[in-house]
Image (spheres, rainbow, N blue to C red):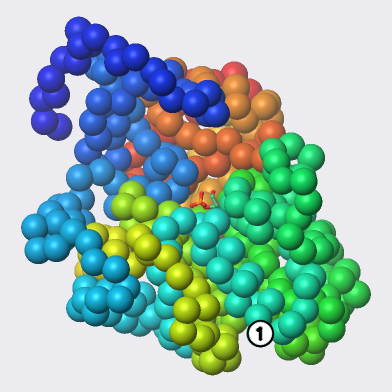
Amino acid sequence: MNAKPDLSAVPAVPDHLARVFAQYPLPLASAEGVWLHTRDNRRVLDLYGGHAVAALGYGHPGWTRALTEQARACQFQSNAVPMDVRLRAAARLVRFAGLGLDTVFFINSGAEANENALKMAFRMTGRAQVVALEHGFHGRTAAAGAITWGAAQSWYGFPRTPFEVKFISRTDIAAIESAISEQTAAVVVEPVQGVGGAFDVGAAYLAALRARCDATGAVLIFDEVQCGVGRTGYPFAANLYGVTPDMITTAKALGNGFPCAALMMSDRVAAAVQLDALGTTFGAGPLACAAIEAVIEAIESEGLLERVRRVSAYVRKTCIVGPITGHQGAGHLTGLRTTRPAKDIQRELLARNILTGTSGDPHVLRLLSAFILEEQHVDLLRAALLELPK
Ligand SMILES: Cc1ncc(COP(=O)(O)O)c(C=O)c1O
């Protein structure tokens, strides 16, 4: 590890930020690999990756080089100006997924990707109802918040939702048939729910959604904002479960921290795209595209899908100890079931210099580790868990 400057003597900056986020006692100075370095000179193992974003860890050389070179070459031009880096990013993403979702619209965030996916589904079907899953999370904008479970009761903030939403159980396959009808424009599902507790809805559930959408003409949208781009150990959860939706939305790991998102469409959806129907200023900017290209290049050239599968299996094999009783989720979207409130265990682990996450399930500790994580890091988690009260 490089020696880091002692920042503890640097005066704190006045805080004018809106009080919207609870914050960890983790004043960050810098980061490297899977390690965070704090202003008070701690070295913290990051098993959360900034809400699943830092997939390549910190300071990845290829990603850093790609952004630097693109910043030098041209930091921005709009979608009205053709650029090779944009074509390369789209081609790379389509090839990486290998799902036949061969048309890409790049935007800036997960919520925006879902917003545009819904717009396409309404346009294609002429219908006005959406089916979403209980415990699902899709973002904070008007449409994405409308399909987010529990948002209306807690933070939604708009006087009404822009369309009708029906929420269905994430476990009851038998309920799918009656919930999805000829009135349904779209069904939106996270194949592995993130905020909902690293909950894997499973291949049979997804296949039942696919079949019912085919029967009714509803459009099937996989929200892979959190579980996509290699996090499950496969390019997308659609690859893992063998079920192909009409659209995939993805973000987070896609840029490894450079804000970007993608809406991937089947030919049927792409046929409904018209000039000017969708739009964005920043989406598909050259820096975002350089980041996307570098992320996929790293995943492929460094064998990171295989590594995610191997190291996440090692977590599941070795970390069911102390206050952990079981696991759920897929790959590095790992839920560890806890005997005690997960937020207490999260706090106790942070006191031992390991950063983890919680979720909507109070008894699930959520790990969103970087794809470069190694077994030796997992051993540190196991050792810390063994120190905690059961
Ligand atoms: C599954 C899922 N969809 C959508 C979003 C929203 O993404 P963003 O915060 O980039 O708008 C999130 C964010 O956590 C998410 O986990």
Pick the front one: 20 or 10: 20
Where residue 167 appears, x then y in whole percent? Answer: 81, 59
Pick the front one: 360 or 144: 144
Q: Residue 226, relative to residue 240: is it above or below? A: above
Badge 1 element: helix
- Ligand 1 neighbours mark 1 (CB distance < 8 Å): no
Quarter of the image containing the N terminus?
top left
- Any part of residue 241 in sight: no
Q: Residue at x 20, y 50 (%)?
A: 60
Q: Amino acid at mark 1?
A: Met
Where residue 344 appears, x then y in whole percent? Answer: 60, 22
Judged from this view, the residue extending furthest toward the right is 178
Q: Residue 377, relative to residue 301: is it above or below? A: above
Q: Residue 379, relative to residue 13: is it above or below? A: below
Q: Is residue 260 left or right of residue 268?
A: left
Quarter of the image containing the C terminus?
top right
Q: Residue at x 37, y 63 (%)?
A: 281
Q: Residue at x 72, y 84 (%)?
A: 125
- Any part of residue 357 in sight: yes
Q: Is residue 161 left or right of residue 369?
A: right
Q: Residue at x 66, y 58 (%)?
A: 143
Where residue 222 appears, x then y in whole percent? Answer: 60, 69
For label 1, the residue is 124
Q: Residue 334, relative to residue 29: is it above or below? A: below
Q: Is residue 59 left or right of residue 89?
A: left
Where residue 61 appears, x then y in whole percent? Answer: 15, 52
